Image (spheres, rainbow, N blue to C red):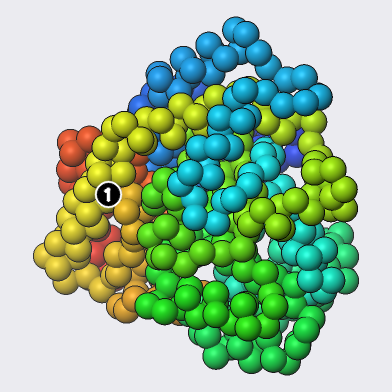
Amino acid sequence: MLNEKSKQLHEEAKKFTPGGVHTSIRNIDPRLIFTKSEGAYIYDADGNKYIDFQAAFGPYILGHNYKEVNDRVIESLARTDLYGVGTTDLEIKCAEKITKYVPSAEQVLFCNSGSEATYHAIRLSRAITNRKKLIKFQGCYHGWHDYVARNMLSEPHMIGKRDPGSAGMMDEAIDNTLICTFNDLDNVERTLVENKNEVAALIVEPIPHNIGCIMPEVGFLQGLRDLCSKHGTILIFDEVITGFRHDLGGYQNVSGVTPDLTTMGKAMANGFPMAALAGKKEYMERFNTNSGGDVWFAGTYNGHAIGTSATIATMEIMETEPVHQHIFALGDRMRNGIREIHDRLSLKAYVAGFGSVWTTYFMDFEPKNYTDLMQNDAKMYVTYRKKLLERGIFKMPMNIKRNHISYSHTKEDIDNTLQAIEDVLKELVQSRVSK
């Protein structure tokens, strides 16, 4: 794989931007510069073409530069944009659609990123309960702000311990965030009891996709609902990834468990910047967008025509076309195909996934939480992905990251990917044997 132009452009970028990238997780080897995207494919500065399963961490549920969505955005911008006062017809229509499908969404507020949405959800929870503390789960990611930026991809010796994700975080924010183990209801209950009448909210990815795909055990999400109701704690589902990708109503619609508040983003607008916070009317009306509300909610670009029109278009395509049927079927084809390859090669690995999402953990059992993932062969995981890059398959070359299938992917794309996977795994297995 030639990447000389990418290398040159990366060096140029570093002159003007620290590290040459505008989000920390993008600083990955090899440092590719991308110049074009269409459907299921992305192209780098050297002209290399890749079948894209990274999907910018998940927004592209329909595919890159999806014409119907782009056309709707262009049409909207021909007549409207942003006013900074009142509301627009697009905002009303978009919010109405979300309340129609998402079980917890009696009312909706728009913002521009998942981090903003989780920040507002937590602030609102503290106002409702008049409590400070928050529960999150080891390994889960809910944004960049101080409230939740701890115990994400912790080193083994820091699992469950005080592990802030950044310098400059406030001690009070760090210490008021309590860490629990996913799929362990006893641990959650014990934490709530030990911090009786102090926990404002529990925030959870219903499927922890930040660490690939850890499925909730039967009864776990309902158990969280029951414990939060019992202890007067607000239950927040962070559906920034799972929402819209797994169902128009989010994973809460799949699981049958309804949280108090829901954060959404990514797939809702097929790549355009858009996020939302939704929840019970009695809670949402505490925001000062409502007359008399006492919880601050603001943002110059909230409800911009770009995001609202893209969301409406994306949801309408999901309503009228077999989007989820298609991506779920291809997800099954991919997972089953990889499992067959593992069997043929007698390779110990676990293929995890749900719907259009999957990843391969190089370990011999199904992980239930972040601690289990310490058994994953991280070196093998990253090497495997880098070798797939050389064959035109783009999966983030980073440990325990998920992959995404879009409506633009075809059976041929999946089959070509499976052939590349088999070729790479044969090479890696042979390399192990010859050592």
Q: How many marks?
A: 1
**What residue is pinned by disc 1?**
328
* Three-letter residue code for mark 1: Phe
Query: Taking the image as drawn, is residue 434 in sight?
Result: no
Give whichever of 258, 352 is nearer the camera: 258
Is residue 294 shown above or below 55?
below
Residue shown at the point (16%, 71%) measured from the top left:
346
Which residue appears at 87% of the width and 48% of the height?
292
Q: Quadrant of residue 351?
A: bottom left
Quarter-of-image position of residue 289: top right
Q: Nearer the viewer, residue 263 or 152?
A: 263
Side (left or right) of 66 relative to 334: right
118, above or below 221, in the image:
above
Residue drawn at x 56%, y 33% is 94
Q: Is residue 144 above or below residue 291?
A: below
x, y percentage for residue 381? 40, 61
Front-most of residues 121 and 362: 121
Instruction: Point out residue 209 in the picture as x, y percentages from the top left corner.
Output: 48, 59
Residue 253 visible, this angle:
yes
Residue lying furthest top? 78
Residue 4 position, x and y percent, is: 50, 28
Give the quarter of the figure containing the N terminus: top left
Up-down relation of residue 247 to residue 233 (above or below)? above
Q: Position of residue 349 (x, y in %)?
A: 29, 70
